[in-house]
Image (cartoon, rainbow, N blue to C red):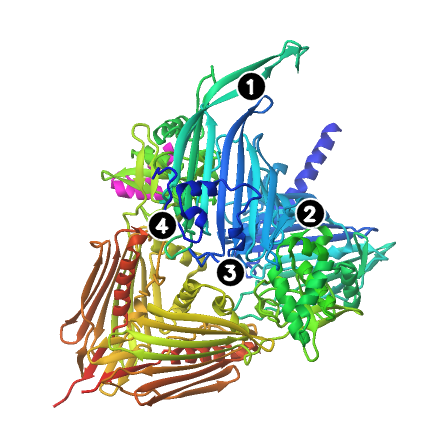
């Protein structure tokens, strides 16, 4: 009897291993699915179980088969936790190509590290790290972990294909919660039915989604950042209780009210700041002037320091703390700026936004926590002025690539409203470049250049900072951004102005250049556009393009270069003018040769927008034409 | 050097330090809470207008103190005063103090104090204190922690001061002192006092002249209470007595003024390699009436210890497993070079590098070999074992990678040694071998390991070895050009060797041929690549060969009876890398180079040469850098241009900068020259 039970036990232990051995064998993979992949997700199972108090137990099992060294980092997994997110468990198993178990993780393999975002001075975030990397490919690694989140605000969305370049064999997710609690779901993917009805058993309800055989996405250039390439099931709470702060994310108004509640009473200023506000704004006529004065005061007296602790990740420090420390994060500084404006009798709105060069999708009809940043919106008579409060140098009203052209949740008396931040179009992102160049036979040239940049083009190569830098730094800037050989700088200057809400930078330089032209026998060879030649970095595709593409920054460049030809030389042949106009933009070049002055006049406007995949080739060709035309050269011949 | 209390070149603005040596000493001893008003009111830093912030004073003191409870403890006292100039400079108001907790030995950071000084609107000076709210402790890992301090009320113009203490019993990690930083430093000073029981070697790096550099001795005394053991416990009994011992203290004192900022420049991958600093290596500890514990006294002594070390030299005694493998990979009639190659290939393909550095293997060589992965030290120890088994004289080389900074030839700093490669005697010469990268050809080491010098650890004769590569990075191209209608047709055959060949082979292997070809064509944007093929991607010892044909209309202009041809610019990227007016750091090419390009251009029927760029040869420092451009007419209808660029010497000090800039300017001008062809006048 004893022997039998022992046998049974052994059998029980062996069974799963035998099954797994079959399960994870590399030979079992569909070769089509993994054709070009460096790794594949064999299986991912996520389970989110919500208890009566709203606590979420999240268990994840994920299995990767790794084929190549470049994907080996997948065999190291991080589980994030903090004071409020409890770490429960993390373990891993490694299988060889045949699917045989070769390694099990030990508790001591788990390392513990702090996990601060690079810009933060303090957070309570930490992570458990388990490294199971092997160096014989292919192999399979299986991770199992569990964490507990304190409330429904933390509910996780489902990303069945988290790495678009990796195919997925099978993925599933379960949300299991008490009948009286609610999680909302939303998906843009045709593969996911977000409106699925839950299965109800006694007082619990449960929903499960699963997907199989997801192909890898081959990335293409200029893919719109807001596109849906891989399926996502967004999950967000309705009512929740965050450390006693009851909230409801089901409408933008209720979301806004919750943020309003967190911020309430945090905008009290002390008497000295109040009188400062008075001093600064007294005698100023318009709201804009007052805002400008207060914004400058805020910029000069604070700096950005990020400290995120518990709910402090969601609510600002009080204005009085900013007064005391003269620093704060985006929340604290926006709240403080709002308090300054309030004191001056100007209404403003705290606004949540997702900051980043690449925009992320925000779905109007599905309120959730899309945001990672806060700015301030000041409604003026005709327009809204947006203030980035974490920058000590941004010109007033300048949002730039980090926050322009996207949805922000404006916090107001009714609750919250989703509003779009301004977009900088090709007419606003302009650069006017005028140059006079006196040529010499020996390749030396005297250049006087005047450049005016507006809108997003005022950000080009750190232009916005140039005005407050030294000559040395400006010279370095010149050398880095013009492909010229400088013999000597005569002068270089830069100024920053505001044209309405638009930022404008004007730069002037006088420079002596060498190797500007080359002489061969009786000829001087002159490339006409060395100051602003365009390069697209794109090339024609061999195969067909799959996805739409985005021309993500529209701009307009106007150039006028006047060349004074050395005495005794004439232009051999004037090139022909060029004029191209199509759905992507306009390119025009003209040449004049009057009284020993050769003038090159160029205008290039590129529109922004999302275009269908089938016109990509035309787009590349247009930019190629521009690139080639920008290399135009003339020959100056010595008159005999 | 070693001038005591003298003042070097000083800036007029700072009258406190500009007048006499006595004053410069005063600045060194700025008291906490007493920052001169001049600095608070100062608006700009004339000596270096680029600076975002300036270190006014940075003073450190390390002293060994004794308590009967804890024994000896190193006490560090640090005081730093920083002036913020621009808004970018406000980040210098955040301080990070690293501290460690290693095997029961700990650092304790305490007594953190700070002040921020600003000029108020009324012109008065406002002082704000650092409070606990501004101090955060981050436990990065089990052994490594950070104390982070974020000063309040900081804006452009603020002066910040911080002072703190660290108590540490990490005797073998006596903290180094950097006199230089990425912002300028007006005054930096370090004092060290340690009892004769500890011996440290000190290593000064950098080209600064010290205002103070002296060594003295002083008397020290330890007092403690003698206690008796009663019932197995320590108690202070009635018979307790005061005990004491006298000893000698070694005192060091360095100070330096007006240290320039250390900034990034082209051809410097790690500016910190050149920072001015003093470092310490524990040599030995010896308490009265006990034997001396040697730690790492000198490079030679360190060699002896490493060879005797179970975790280092002794691992080469446990290499029986290679005995059967070596004969199986070598043929009896192999030459020496073939043997080395076969071994290098075998080890590097059998054992992949797991990304870990360090000089000590952490698992047995046999295990690493069987598992197929290992750290640099495991892989290269295996390589040494194989080479020795095959009858070669092979020894380990210990060194530091480039990101650590240069190795100091006078004294070894054990904690900075993080790399191990192999030295093998071959044809009477000693060669550096490294099996951690299976793409690099014989005799070429990975870039991160090319850090000037390494130390060969040998039983009989340990010595320095130069990492300077004897095998240059070469590119040799034969380019045939013909003109048809208004197209330029080009046929290229290019052979690449050395480090670059290894990188290309690796990329081709990683990306696959299809992607590699696509990228290759995209890089030649002005051209339509008609066909391309690549050879020897899998043969480590052979040059990487690129063969391609392409066509373009760029670079050719037909104007009346003339054809202008300037294809040269497309093949020879010779943009002058040195554009800035001044340079502070040396220039380091790392690998020697040899680029050679031959263009053979068919003159189209009915045309003749109107003008051809002139031949020139330009040498820098007796061919340390050499550029030649030779144009010639070959036969009746061909132009031949040969262009070569050699880097024979990889390291140049910054005083050569202006001349190097001129040298590259000549190349740049030559590149832009145009060939002019003219239609023949027909009779």
Alpha carbon of mark 3 to alpha carbon of mark 4: how far? 26 Å
* Marked residue nearer the N-terminal end (3 or 2): 3
The quadrant in which the C terminus of chain A is found is bottom left
* Residue A389 in view (yes/no): no
Q: Is residue B62 above or below residue B491?
A: above
Helix, strand or loop status at disc 3: loop
* Residue B360 in view (yes/no): yes
Alpha carbon of mark 2 to alpha carbon of mark 1: how far? 47 Å
User: Which of label 1 and label 4 is nearer to you?
Assistant: 1
User: Which of label 1 and label 3 is nearer to you?
Assistant: 1
Q: Is residue B100 above or below residue A156?
A: above
Q: Position of residue A443 (x, y in %)?
A: 27, 74
Q: Residues within 10 Å of mark 2 (few under 14, many from 20)?
A: some
Q: Chain of mark 1?
A: B
Magenta stretch contains residue B163:
no
Q: Chain of mark 3?
A: A
What is the magenta range?
B320-344
Residue of label 1: B223
Residue of label 2: A82
Query: Which residue lies at the image location 77% right of the left edge and 53% below the top edge?
Result: A151
Residue of label 4: B440
Alpha carbon of mark 1 to alpha carbon of mark 4: how far? 61 Å
Residue of label 3: A36
Helix, strand or loop status at disc 1: strand
């Amino acid at each position: 009897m004893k022997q039998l039970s022992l046998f049974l036990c052994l059998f029980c232990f062996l069974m799963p291993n035998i099954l797994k051995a079959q399960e994870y064998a590399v030979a079992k993979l569909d070769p089509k699915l993994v054709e070009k992949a460096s790794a594949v997700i064999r299986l991912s199972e996520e389970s989110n179980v919500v208890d009566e108090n709203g606590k979420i137990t999240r268990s994840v099992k994920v299995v990767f088969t790794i084929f190549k060294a470049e994907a080996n980092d997948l065999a190291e997994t991080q589980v994030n936790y903090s004071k409020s997110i409890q770490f429960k468990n993390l373990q891993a198993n490694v299988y060889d190509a045949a699917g045989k178990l070769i390694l099990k993780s030990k508790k001591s393999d788990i390392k513990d590290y702090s996990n601060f975002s690079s810009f933060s001075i303090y957070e309570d975030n930490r992570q458990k790290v388990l490294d199971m990397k092997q160096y014989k490919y292919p192999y399979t690694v299986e991770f199992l972990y569990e964490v507990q989140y304190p409330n429904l605000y933390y509910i996780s969305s489902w990303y069945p294909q988290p790495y678009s370049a990796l195919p997925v064999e099978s993925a599933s997710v379960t949300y299991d919660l008490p009948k009286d609690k609610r999680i909302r779901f939303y998906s843009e993917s045709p593969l996911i039915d977000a409106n699925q009805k839950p299965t109800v058993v006694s007082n619990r309800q449960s929903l499960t989604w699963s997907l199989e055989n997801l192909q890898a996405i081959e990335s293409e250039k200029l893919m719109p950042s807001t596109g849906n390439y891989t399926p996502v099931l967004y999950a967000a709470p309705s009512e929740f209780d965050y450390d006693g702060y009851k909230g409801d994310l089901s409408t933008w108004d209720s979301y806004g009210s919750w943020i309003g509640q967190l911020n309430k009473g945090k905008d009290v200023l002390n008497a000295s700041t109040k009188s400062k506000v008075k001093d600064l704004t007294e005698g100023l006529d318009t709201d804009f002037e007052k805002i400008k004065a207060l914004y400058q005061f805020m910029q000069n007296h604070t700096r950005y320091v990020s400290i995120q602790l518990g709910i402090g990740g969601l609510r600002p420090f009080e204005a009085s703390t900013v007064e005391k420390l003269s620093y704060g994060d985006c929340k604290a500084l926006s709240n403080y700026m709002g308090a300054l404006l309030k004191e001056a009798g100007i209404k403003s709105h705290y606004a949540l936004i997702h900051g980043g060069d690449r925009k992320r999708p925000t779905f109007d009809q599905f309120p959730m926590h899309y945001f990672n940043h806060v700015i301030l919106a000041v409604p003026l008579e005709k327009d809204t002025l947006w203030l980035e409060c974490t920058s000590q140098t941004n010109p007033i009203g300048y949002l730039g690539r980090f926050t322009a052209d996207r949805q922000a949740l404006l916090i107001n008396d009714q609750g919250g409203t989703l509003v779009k931040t301004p977009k900088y179009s090709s007419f606003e992102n302009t650069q006017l470049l005028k140059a006079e160049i006196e040529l010499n036979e020996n390749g030396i040239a005297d250049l006087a250049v005047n450049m005016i940049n507006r809108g997003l083009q005022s950000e080009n190569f750190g232009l916005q900072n140039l005005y407050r830098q030294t000559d040395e730094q400006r010279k370095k800037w010149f050398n880095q951004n013009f492909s010229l050989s400088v013999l000597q700088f005569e002068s270089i200057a830069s100024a920053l102005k505001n044209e309405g809400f638009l930022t404008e930078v004007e730069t002037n330089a006088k420079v002596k250049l060498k190797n500007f032209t080359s002489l061969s026998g009786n000829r001087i060879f002159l490339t006409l556009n060395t100051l602003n030649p365009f390069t697209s970095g794109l090339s024609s595709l061999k195969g067909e393009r799959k996805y739409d593409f985005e021309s993500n920054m529209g701009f307009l460049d106007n150039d006028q270069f006047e060349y004074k030809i050395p005495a005794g030389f004439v232009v051999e042949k004037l090139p022909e003018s060029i004029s191209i106009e199509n759905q992507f933009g306009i390119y025009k070049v003209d040449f004049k040769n009057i009284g020993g002055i050769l003038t090159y006049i160029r205008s290039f406007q590129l529109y922004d927008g999302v275009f269908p995949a089938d016109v990509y080739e035309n787009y590349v060709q247009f930019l190629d034409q521009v690139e080639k035309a920008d290399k135009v050269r003339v020959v100056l011949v010595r008159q005999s | 050097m070693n001038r005591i209390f003298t003042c070097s070149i000083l800036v007029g603005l700072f009258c406190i330090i500009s007048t006499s040596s006595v004053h410069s000493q005063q600045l060194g001893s700025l008291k906490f809470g007493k920052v001169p008003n001049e600095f608070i009111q100062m608006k700009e830093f004339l000596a270096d207008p680029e600076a975002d912030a300036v270190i006014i004073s940075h003073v450190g003191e390390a002293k060994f103190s004794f308590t009967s409870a804890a024994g000896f403890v190193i006490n560090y006292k640090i005081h730093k005063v920083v002036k913020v100039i621009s808004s970018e400079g406000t980040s210098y108001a955040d301080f990070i103090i690293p501290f460690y907790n290693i095997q029961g030995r700990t650092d304790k950071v305490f007594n953190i104090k700070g002040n921020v000084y600003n000029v108020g609107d009324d012109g008065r000076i406002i002082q704000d204190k650092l409070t606990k709210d501004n101090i955060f402790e981050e436990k990065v890992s089990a052994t490594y922690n950070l104390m982070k301090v974020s000063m309040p009320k900081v804006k452009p113009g603020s002066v910040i001061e911080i002072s703190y203490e660290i108590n540490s019993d990490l005797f073998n990690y006596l903290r180094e002192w950097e006199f230089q930083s990425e912002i300028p430093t007006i005054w930096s000073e370090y004092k060290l006092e340690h009892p004769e029981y500890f011996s440290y070697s000190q290593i000064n790096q950098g080209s600064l002249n010290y205002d103070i550099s002296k060594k003295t001795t002083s008397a020290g005394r330890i007092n403690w209470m003698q206690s008796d053991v009663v019932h197995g416990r320590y108690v202070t009994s009635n018979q307790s007595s005061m005990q004491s011992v006298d000893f000698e203290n070694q005192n060091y004192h360095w100070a330096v003024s007006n240290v320039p900022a250390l900034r990034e420049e082209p051809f410097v991958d790690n500016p910190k390699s050149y920072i001015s600093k003093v470092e310490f290596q524990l040599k030995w500890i010896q308490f009265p009436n006990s034997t001396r514990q040697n730690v790492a006294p000198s490079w030679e002594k360190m060699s002896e210890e490493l060879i005797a070390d179970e975790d280092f030299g002794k691992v080469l005694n446990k290499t029986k497993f290679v005995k059967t493998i070596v004969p199986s990979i070598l043929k009896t009639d192999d030459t020496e070079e073939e043997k080395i190659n076969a071994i290098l290939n075998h080890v590097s393909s059998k054992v992949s590098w797991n990304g870990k550095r360090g000089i000590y293997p952490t698992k047995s060589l046999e295990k690493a070999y069987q598992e197929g992965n290992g750290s640099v030290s495991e892989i290269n120890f295996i390589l040494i074992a194989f080479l020795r088994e095959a009858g070669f004289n092979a020894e380990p080389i210990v060194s530091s990678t480039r990101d650590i900074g240069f190795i100091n030839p006078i004294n070894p700093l054990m904690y900075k040694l993080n790399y191990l490669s192999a030295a093998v005697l071959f044809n009477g010469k000693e060669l550096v071998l490294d099996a951690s990268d299976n793409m690099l050809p014989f005799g070429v080491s990975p870039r991160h390991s090319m850090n000037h010098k390494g130390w060969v650890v040998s039983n009989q004769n340990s010595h320095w070895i130069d990492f300077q590569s004897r095998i240059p990075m070469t590119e040799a191209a034969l380019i045939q050009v013909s003109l048809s209608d208004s197209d330029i047709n080009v046929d290229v055959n290019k052979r690449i060797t050395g480090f670059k060949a290894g990188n290309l082979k690796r990329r081709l292997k990683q990306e696959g041929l299809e992607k590699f070809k696509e990228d290759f064509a995209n890089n030649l944007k002005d051209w339509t690549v008609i066909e391309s093929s690549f050879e020897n991607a899998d043969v480590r010892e052979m040059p990487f060969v690129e063969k391609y044909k392409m066509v373009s209309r760029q670079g050719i202009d037909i104007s009346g009876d003339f054809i202008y041809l300037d294809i040269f610019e497309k093949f020879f990227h010779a943009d002058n890398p040195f554009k800035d007016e001044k340079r502070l750091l040396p220039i380091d090419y790392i690998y020697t180079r040899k680029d050679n390009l031959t263009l053979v251009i068919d003159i189209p029927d009915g045309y003749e040469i109107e003008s051809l760029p002139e031949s020139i040869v330009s040498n820098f420092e007796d061919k340390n850098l050499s550029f030649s451009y030779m144009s010639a007419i070959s036969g009746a209808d061909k132009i031949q241009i040969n262009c070569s660029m050699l880097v024979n010497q990889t390291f140049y000090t910054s005083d050569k900068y202006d001349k190097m800039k001129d040298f590259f300017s000549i190349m740049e001008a030559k590149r832009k020259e145009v060939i002019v062809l003219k239609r023949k006048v027909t009779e």
